[in-house]
Image (tube, rainbow, N blue to C red):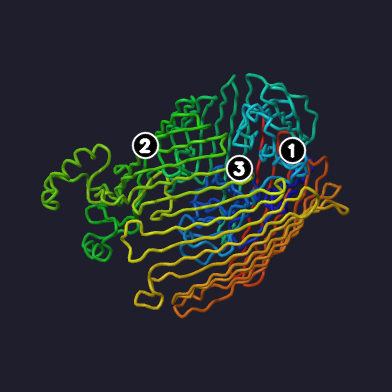
Amino acid sequence: MNSPVKLWSGRLTGALGLGSFILLLVVPIPDAYSQVSMRVVSVSPAEAPPNTPITIRVDLRQGAQLDKVYFVYRQFGESNYKRLEMDIVGTAATVSMPAKEAVPPFIEYYLVLVSQTGQTETYPVSESTNPFFTPPVNTLQIAVRAQESTSSPVIFLSPETTEPLAPEDVLISVSLLRVGSEIAKPLTQLLLDDVNITGDAVFSNDIIVYSPENFVLRLRPGIHNITVRLFDRSGRLQQTASSTFTVTGRAEFIAPSVATKYSYGVSVQLESRHELVSDVGTWYNRANLQLTGRADIWRLRSNFFITSDEKADRQPQNRYFVGAESPWLKIGYGDGYPSFPNLILSGKRLRGLHSALTLGAFNLDLAFGSTARAVDGVLLKTISADTLAYEQERDPTGAYARIDSVTWGKFSYGTYARDLFAIRPSFGSGETWQLGFTWLTSKDDIRSIQYGIRPQENIVVGTDLLTRIDEGRIELSGQMAFSAFNSDISSGNFTDAYIDSVYKKDAQAIKDARDILQHLITVNDYLRPLSFKKLSTLAYDVSTSFDYFNNHLKFTYLFRGSDYNSFGQTFLRKDIKGFNLSDRIRLFENQVLFVAGYERLQDNTSDTKAATATFSNLNFALSYYPRQRAPNFTLGFSRYVNTNDLNTSGPDQLSAIDDATNRFLVQTSYDFEFGAKHITTLSFSTSHRGDYTIHQYNVNNTTVMLGVTTRYTIPLQTAAEVVLNKNELPAGSLTGGTRKLDYTTISFSGRYSVLNETLSFLTAVTPTFGDFKRTVVDLGSEWYAQSAMKVSLQFSYLQNQGVTNDSIWSLRYRYDL
């Protein structure tokens, strides 16, 4: 069963063509939870299989005006939000979430968008001035669950048999969760159109994932077949399961493919885009070239993205990567996101060398390059020499430099180039055990710019251990890292004279330490730690899990020192310690899933704060996925309590913390046939935050969403959705009080295809009214001029309240060879 959430958050496209003159538009349908946003069109996926990496895609209306987009998320049962920086390419921002984060029943998330001027915006809307630590009252979810139960032990998670996909959007994922013990899962074979693709698939516990876009096997328009073969331990074929899916475009007969030792693929994409925003018109031109190839056991891939957004006064917008990989070696150069233990290096874009040697008994991961390029400061104003002293007294933090003999300039501070090197040797394949050691060093290049402030330096050392017992049913894991961080290396290392004058008692000990450490990091007053009495730069976590009798029990303890820093993991929450306990129970042949969790965290790990805050979190969820055709549903309850040691009515009442949030959630979906195939979804959530301090920052939210998507026997699909948001937010005064923010969004869309689905038409209208008013009209089409050629043109019109209206045109061309 597929929900309209998933259907609406994908791209619905259409086409219009006549002779040599073609009008083509491609329009993403508004996100299923239609929220207020001037920049976000849609977020996908809305559903994902468990224990597999999830690629999050955000379609943007004005991607060029954004400097960064962050995906902020947490698992069900956690109070701590994690953060990933998304890679912006044109009008799409993407990021890959680790497989271990995909845990039922859902992942809760929101987006933080940062403009080139530094202003932040959240999606859904938030009233907080610091959205990284204060999330919106109504966040979004990605449902994590297997497909409906069937009599077959093989569950095809994606693609959907009823949902036509563009070739680049196909992701094949299969679950072997219900396969019997007589089956040897490592011997499982995966075939696509009679081609054995097992060697290219990723096996992760009970999940198999294959992405054709990453390899040279290009999918032509038409119907494709997926086959899974199951073998026993002696190698005899025991069972076979199959599923089909459809790729959009001009259908044609394709003979069964034959795997060859040598093959290649080419994909070219071009775009020209015009945006009229706030009466300012801007053209953007972009090109993307992807080359893939196979030579025996070697796979070659490269990607080149060039855009007119590239400017010398901002971080790189162009992207490139060239790499090769085999079963035992991966090596590439360009833009990528190296994955090391997440305490040290994760989710950070690195332009440079990426490599991994995998021999089983011994492995080596290596990455080095730049995480930021040099961007010098700009001239803000010119100052005559006789008024320089006055200007410096008025703004002593500014950057000043002589322009000529009678004129000085005041400059903004730029960004230093930052280099990073990371290496991780490890022992063991990871199937039963693995022990790794990581070293990371990163430093700002002082000479890279003329006008800068506080260049920094960082080293991190760490170790990690993984042990699996009884075929993975018992898992023990842990990681630990220790950092040294210098927040200002501009003055260089301590001199002997400085040590003698400032650190008279411990002068010789500090000199000895400097002589050793200066080969690793700059040693001065800005280095942390300067003392090892309190391990404020230490971070670690340990966890253990047990998976027996359809019951998955997991316990985690974590510690993050207040001064821990890693330039490869800049989004880690620091100054926190505590534990998390969760249990997921599968009942009635996996038709019922019950999840319970409790988490308790505390800050003030170095005892430097006036009070210690405690964050506790209690969660319950019950999901039902029936085998027969009936509605599925999820019920959830969460309670978040935050307190500290200060009295809410005493002299420290302004710093006191005492609040509790209760949240209820109901989600259900159902598909049925009545003249056509209908897929319905209903969601209801309500939360209440009671603040029992003098601030009285009480927050109430209720969100109701009802949507239906209909597929007719003729090539027509329609969708309709209503979302009601009612919010009571703090009035912003010490005396308490609230103010309302209520709005309703209605979405209508339709897609009609002709000429064997090579030509389609699309329209979508999304009005929002209430305390926020706006209407968005999208028109579009898509045309496959040839089976491998697609040309498209997008038009969007935004009728805004209180400001000028906006419009966007975009012409795209894609050719696959």
Q: Which residue is mark 2?
A: 439
Q: Measured from the top left, where is residue 7 in percent x and y?
A: 71, 50
Question: Dot 1: what SS?
Answer: strand
Q: Nearer the viewer, residue 675 or 491?
A: 675
Work out whether residue 146 or residue 750 is closer to the camera in this orientation and state it.
146
Q: Is residue 304 left or right of residue 269?
A: left
Where on the picture, by quarter, is residue 231?
top right
Determine crowd level at label 2: few under 14, some 14-19, many 20+ residues with C-alpha closer than 10 A: some
Disc 1, disc 2: CB below 8 Å? Answer: no
**Mark 3 near mark 1, Cβ–Cβ under 8 Å?**
no
Q: According to the image, label 1 marks what residue? A: 247
x, y percent for residue 565: 36, 48
**In the image: residue 325, left or right of residue 377:** right
- Is residue 80 visible to the viewer in this orientation of the structure? yes
Mark 3 or mark 1, which is nearer to you?
3
Label 3 vs 1, first from the N-terminus: 1
Name the residue beneath numbered marker 3.
Answer: 548
Query: What's the residue type where badge 1 is placed?
Result: Val
- Name the mark nearer the viewer: 2 or 3: 3
Callout 3 amino acid: Tyr
> Which element carries disc 3, helix, strand or loop?
strand
Kindly identify the residue that appears in the image at 57 percent across and 70 percent down.
688
Q: Secondary structure at mark 2?
A: strand
Q: Residue furthest front?
A: 549
Q: CA distance from mark 3 to mark 1?
A: 40 Å
Asked whether residue 172 appears in the rendered view, the answer is: no
